[in-house]
Amino acid sequence: MKLDLLVIAAHPDDAEICVGGTLLKLASAGRKIGIVDVTRGEMGTRGSRADRDRETARANELLGLSVRENLELPDGRVQVTLEAREHLARILREHRPELVLAQHTEDLHPDHFTTGRLAREAWYLAGLQRLAELDGGPTAARPKRLLHFAGHLPFEPSFVVDIGPVWERKLELVRSYQSQLAPADAGDRGQHFLFGADILSRMETRARFFGERVGVRYGEPLLHVGPLLLGDVAMLA
Ligand SMILES: [Zn+2]
């Protein structure tokens, strides 16, 4: 299916936590959205595989997703292999999104920064016609734009999406992952945010911080590598 946007993230719920507001806004604008999770998140302290599958299905419904796929790489052991990047390049050629959102290539969690690298390599390879022919699948198609979202480490974004209008819906979306929100025991500090187990309040602190940078209440930061063309000079004044 032809998509407008594909998100590539290491673990189920990374996409929702990091860019859930952006996805809700684009879905409301009628865009066709897909997510590729690279792993099933099976190394997480919290929740069984069945819990996580049920939670992901609920999130898919709230987002109105057209596609959700999984690369089935081992959680905690994601590597950029030839096989993985060509598999991902094939998914990009099949769904032909205009925009890819992927984790940033700098993060504390190795799966996150490796997924960011994997996404960049697959994004480039998806545009190589000879590779597409060798693969025997759909013709080459490189998405127009690749933007990164932030995991553990904040960055200076290229722009911030105002997610104020969908903030309550984003909370509901992330609450789909109920097993991930409650600490499993007293020693559980959470895998997403190393410095605390309360995912929702950390998410809010971050959204308020980036929102404040651009004068709105809640924001999600996105990073483009290199300058972006200003299409309409009238936007300046
Ligand atoms: Zn993650």
Image (cartoon, grey):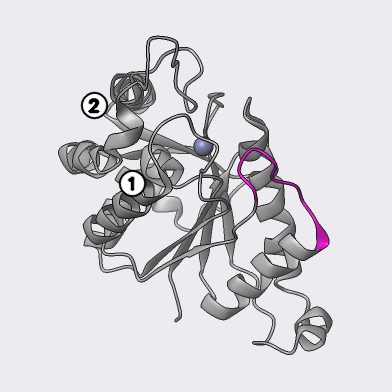
Q: Which residue is mark 2?
A: 217
**Amino acid type, label 1:** Asp
Q: Nearer the viewer, residue 79 or 25?
A: 79
> As displayed, is residue 44 above or below residue 90?
above
Residue annotated with mark 1: 51
Horizontal arrangement in the rendering, residue 115 relative to residue 70 (left or right): right
Residue at coordinates 44% horizontally, 57% vertically from top-left? 232
Q: Nearer the viewer, mark 2 or mark 1?
A: 1
Q: Earlier in the sequence, mark 2 or mark 1?
A: 1
Residue at screen point 31% across, 28% down: 181
Residue 53 picture location, percent across and down: 37, 54
The answer to whether one can see residue 158 in this image is no
Q: Which mark is residue 43?
A: none
Q: Decide which of 184, 56 is in the foreground and name it.
A: 184
Q: Three-letter amino acid code at disc 2? A: Arg
Taking the image as shown, residue 229 lies to the left or right of residue 202, namely: right
The span shown in magenta is 74-82
Assess whether residue 173 is covered by the magenta stretch.
no
Q: Secondary structure at mark 2?
A: loop
The part of the image, by quadrant, that contains residue 104 is: top right
On the rendered structure, is 149 left or right of 171?
Answer: right
Q: Quadrant of the C terminus?
A: top left
Instruction: For residue 45, say whether it is visible.
Output: yes
Residue 106: percent from left, percent from top = 67, 31
Label 1 residue SS = helix
Going 27% across and 30% down the picture, which residue do you hit? 218
Point out residue 97 in the picture as x, y percentages from the top left corner. 51, 70
Residue at the (37%, 22%) spot, across then down: 184
- The image position of residue 182, as x and y in percent, is 30, 24
